[in-house]
Image: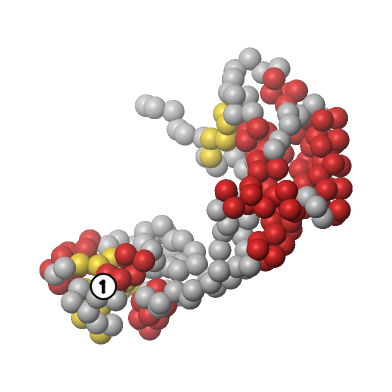
Amino acid sequence: MFLKEDRVEALLPQVLKNPRASKAHQAFLETWEACGLPPQTLSQVVGGVYCDGPPEPLLEEPERQRATDPSLWQLVYIPPVFDATGMEIMCFDSLEEAQTKLNSLKLGEIDEGGGIIFKNKEPVAEKLVLKYMEKEDFLGFLEEATKTPEKFEPTETDEIKAIEESLLDRLNELSKLAPDIGKLKVEYEAIEEKPKIVYGKPSMSLVELSRLFPDLVTLGGCAKPKPAP
């Protein structure tokens, strides 16, 4: 689970009581300043902090409740754009609505598509083009997505440890990148066109530069848009 930003900020002073963290922070400040880069608060540096716990639920609670409702029809399908879960769930008040959506599904980017309509976890209708997945995967995904989430509350010690590790990783990473970020800053300050839009896969230093100085450079994505005809 990710800790809330205000929780991370509240615990950062305790994290800095650890000599390891305070030493790394001081070294970062010195390197950062020497490279001509603006001051960063610890909250800006640490970013998102993940604390070990049960996996995040696949569905938000209102969606999970609908997906477990035996009076509704659940369509488990392969989305056109493949993501980490590989499937999605939509719930409908009628079979006709579910079938309309099922019939509209197209092949996705992995040459698979379609889905299965369930009612009370029993298959009712299907439209499938499978290449890697199997039919059993659809019911498996529905069962996994509708499981009651585990209740978990990390201790403050767990939170501090997670914040400390994330902070140390970021401080070390930014300290290594600082000289290159400083050089890029000078380079992009000399460019007349501001902000400069950069296409393609950026370096980590360029990613950080765009975060620090969006007025100098912005990331335009992997591919440059085609000119209008």
Q: Quadrant of residue 133?
A: bottom left
In the picture, measured across the screen, residue 225 lies left or right of residue 160, that is left
Please say if 186 is above or below 51: above
> What's the coloring here?
secondary structure
The residue located at (49%, 64%) in the rendering is 84
**Which quadrant is home to the C terminus?**
top left
Q: Quadrant of residue 208?
A: top right
Under circle 1, the secondary element is strand
Outermost residue toward the top in this view: 192
Which amino acid type corresponds to the residue marked 1 in the rendered image?
Gln
Please say if 115 is above or below 228: below
Q: Position of residue 27 (x, y in %)?
A: 86, 42
Residue toward you, 90 or 155: 155
> Would residue 53 be seen by someone viewing this image from the given angle?
yes
In the picture, measured across the screen, residue 128 lies left or right of residue 223, that is left
Please say if 67 is above or below 194: below
The residue located at (70%, 43%) in the rendering is 42
Please say if 102 is above or below 211: below
Q: Position of residue 154 (x, y in %)?
A: 60, 68
In the picture, measured across the screen, residue 185 lies left or right of residue 82, that is right
The residue located at (69%, 56%) in the rendering is 163
The residue located at (27%, 62%) in the rendering is 105
Q: Position of residue 177 (x, y in %)?
A: 78, 41
Residue at image mark 1: 74
